Image: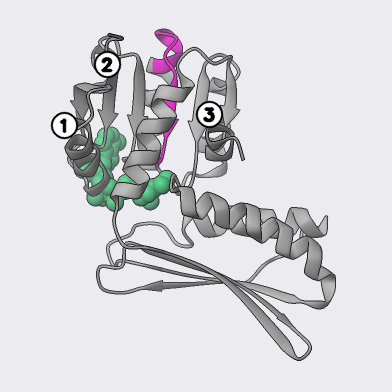
C-alpha cells in the first residue's frame, strides 16, 4: 500500500486547522505529521512533511514560502486577505515550487466560479453586476477572498477592469454565503452558494495537497485540481 501523504498544518489551532485535523483522523491517505500555530517555527516542521497546508494569517506567508523554497516543498494556501506584496511573495515562490492557492476549496464554489464566468458572457454589458457575501462575525478580512475572486472573474468576462460592488455582511456564525447578482432591464438572475460546514474547505484542501505533490512549479488554482 502507498504510504500516506505527510502534511504540515499551519494554523492548526484555528477553526479550519481543527477541521482538517479531524478529517485527517478518518483518512488513511493523510498523516498530519506536524502542526504549527502562532509563534511556532515553520522551518524545522516542514522538513518532516511532503506538503504544507496553510490556513492561518496572511502575515505567516513570508516564513512559510521561505521554508518551502529552502526545502523544495509544495504548498497549499487557503489563507485569504493577503496584501499585494504578500501575493507577490506567493507568485515568486511558485516559480520554484508547485503551489495551490485558492480563496475557496469547496467544489460547489468552484462550480459557482465557472457558472459566473458563463453567465457574465451570456448576459453582457446591459446587466449590472453585484456580489453579496455573508460570514461569521469573527472573520478577519472583508471582502472575502471568494468575493474578490468572483469580482476578478466578472471583470475578466467583460474584458474591462471595472469595479464590481461587493456588499460584506458579518453576522452570527455563518460559515460562508456568496451571491452574484445580475440585474438587467426587467429581469434579475442570482447565483448563490451557501456553505453550512467547514469540512467542504478542509476536504478540498486535503485533495489539493495530494494532487500538488510532484507537479511542476506553478501557481495552481482549485479549478486546476478539479480539472474544471
Ligand atoms: P481562525 O482565526 O480560527 O484560525 C487561524 C489560526 O491561525 C489561529 O489559531 C491563529 O493563532 C493562527 N495564526 C495566526 N497568525 C499565525 C502565524 N503568523 N503563524 C501561524 N499561525 C498563525 O481562522 P479560520 O477560520 O481557521 O481561517 C483561517 C484562514 O483561512 C483565514 O484567512 C480564512 O479567511 C481562510 N479560509 C479559507 C478558506 C478556503 O477555502 N480557502 C475557507 C475557510 C477559511
**SS for tag 1?**
helix
**N-terminal of the two: label 1 or label 2?**
2
> Real-space Cα distance between discs 1 and 2?
12 Å
For numbered disc 3, what is the local secondary structure?
helix
Which residue bears the numbered disc 3?
89
Q: Which mark is residue 148?
A: none
**Mark 3 vs mark 1: in front:** 1
Disc 3 from disc 1: Cα separation: 32 Å
Q: Are marks 3 and 2 in contact (CB under 8 Å)?
A: no
Q: Nearer the viewer, residue 202 or 141?
A: 202
Tell me where residue 79 sits by quadrant: top left
Quadrant location, ligand no. 1: top left
Give the magenta range. Answer: 68-78
Is label 2 in a helix, a strand or a loop?
A: loop
Q: Which residue is mark 1?
A: 25
Which residue does the numbered mark 2 point to in the structure image?
4
Where does the image place residue 98, in percent across and percent down from the top left?
52, 20
Amino acid at each position: 500500500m502507498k504510504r500516506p501523504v505527510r502534511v504540515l498544518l499551519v494554523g492548526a489551532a484555528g477553526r479550519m486547522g481543527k477541521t482538517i485535523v479531524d478529517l485527517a483522523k478518518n483518512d488513511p491517505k493523510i498523516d498530519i505529521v506536524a502542526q504549527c500555530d502562532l509563534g511556532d517555527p515553520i522551518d524545522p516542521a516542514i522538513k518532516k512533511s511532503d506538503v504544507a497546508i496553510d490556513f492561518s494569517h496572511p502575515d505567516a506567508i513570508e516564513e512559510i514560502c521561505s521554508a518551502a523554497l529552502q526545502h523544495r516543498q509544495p504548498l497549499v494556501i487557503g489563507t485569504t486577505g493577503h496584501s499585494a506584496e504578500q501575493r507577490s511573495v506567493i507568485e515568486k515562490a511558485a516559480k520554484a515550487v508547485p503551489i495551490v492557492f485558492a480563496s475557496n476549496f469547496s467544489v460547489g464554489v468552484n462550480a459557482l466560479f465557472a457558472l459566473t464566468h458563463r453567465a457574465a458572457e451570456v448576459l453582457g454589458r446591459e446587466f449590472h453586476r453585484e456580489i453579496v457575501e455573508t460570514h461569521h462575525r469573527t472573520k478577519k478580512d472583508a471582502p472575502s477572498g471568494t468575493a474578490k475572486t468572483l469580482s476578478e472573474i466578472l471583470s475578466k468576462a467583460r474584458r474591462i477592469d471595472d469595479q464590481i460592488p461587493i456588499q460584506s455582511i458579518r453576522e452570527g456564525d455563518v460559515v460562508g454565503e456568496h451571491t452574484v447578482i445580475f440585474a438587467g432591464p426587467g429581469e434579475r438572475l442570482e447565483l448563490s452558494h451557501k456553505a453550512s460546514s467547514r469540512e467542504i474547505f478542509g476536504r478540498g484542501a486535503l485533495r489539493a495537497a495530494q494532487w500538488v505533490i510532484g507537479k511542476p512549479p506553478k501557481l495552481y488554482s482549485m479549478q486546476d485540481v478539479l480539472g474544471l
